[in-house]
Image: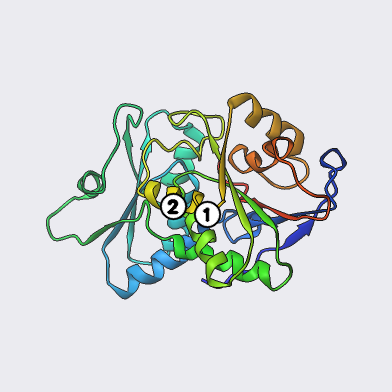
Amino acid sequence: MKTLTPLIKIDIRRFRLLNLLIKDESKNIFGTFKDRRSGLILKNAMEERIDKLVLITSGNAGYSLGRFAKDSKIKIVCIVDKNLKNSIKNELRKYSKLVEVDLSKKILRPEMVISLARENDEEVIWDVTNGFHEAYEQIIEEIKKIIKPDYIILPVGSGEAFVGLYNGIKKYKLKTRLIGVEVKNKWVSFADKLHTPWTPYRSKIQSILKEGHKIISLDEAGIKTAFKENNKIVDIEPSSSVVFGVLPKLKFEKKDKIILINSGRGLY
């Protein structure tokens, strides 16, 4: 999917940074950088004549994929935590079938995810919860045409986007450092799209960190403060506001070019 989201310079005086910009992914068609992966997934699924796509989602990835698949013959199944907000579940039901599970009690492996979506033995089903990090390389392609940043700060859930941006940095031979922001509480958080007890990207992320990139954990108080102080600056949800929350924890040179990834306004 070809897309282009704006890069906006912002002036937040309390941070005392001269070159602070936001890559505003809320301007994607359905309001989230998950749209990048959804377009790729649907294209591949249609080429392979897949019957059904299933994923574990806190809202944004499932909503985006459901909207993309709306006019196709491909069925979408969203596996959600039973305690997910009813408002989010109701939005997801408009475009997909929901399977509610107590995700605080178990970690679902791919084979279990597929079994929850299966209705008959003839169906060809893909689990698309993870595995589409290449969709995020395009963000780097768009950025490099305007600026070569010293740092990019982004929210980290499963790590899919973190890996994708890293690969983009390598592909275009930039010297940019990634700073990912995760939540301390892996099971439940105000930044509800970022709690990820298990991820297939764990080993890859560890190898990336050895090259000088970072991931910083933000506690619940920090997340809530970041959202409260910055949700009027750009169209964000709690999970995307975390990029503001780590700025006071970091030391930059005034001349450093820093890009915050607003992952989107999302469902919350």
The label shown at residue 207 is: 2
Residue 220 picture quarter: top right
- Against 161, residue 168 (above or below) is below
User: Pointer 1: what residue?
Assistant: 211
- At 37% across and 58% down in the image, what residue appears? 131
**Image height of 97 relative to 186, above or below:** below
Disc sitting over residue 252 in the figure:
none
Residue 226: quarter of image: top right
Kind of element beneath mark 2 = helix
The residue sitting at the left extreme is: 121
Q: Nearer the viewer, residue 244 or 110?
A: 244
Residue for point 64% across, 60% down: 176
Quick one: 106 or 185, which is closer to the camera? Answer: 185
User: Where is residue 50 shown, x and y percent of the image?
Assistant: 27, 66
Residue type, numbered disc 1:
Glu
Mark 1, secondary structure of its residue: loop
Q: Which of these two is toward me, 259 or 102?
A: 259
Q: Image height check: is 116 above or below 150?
A: above
- The CA span between labels 1 and 2 is 7 Å
Q: Contact, CB < 8 Å: mark 1 with mark 2?
A: yes
In the image, farthest residue toward the top: 221
Q: Amino acid at mark 2?
A: Ser
* Picture layout, residue 243 above or below residue 19: above
Q: Nearer the viewer, residue 148 or 226?
A: 148
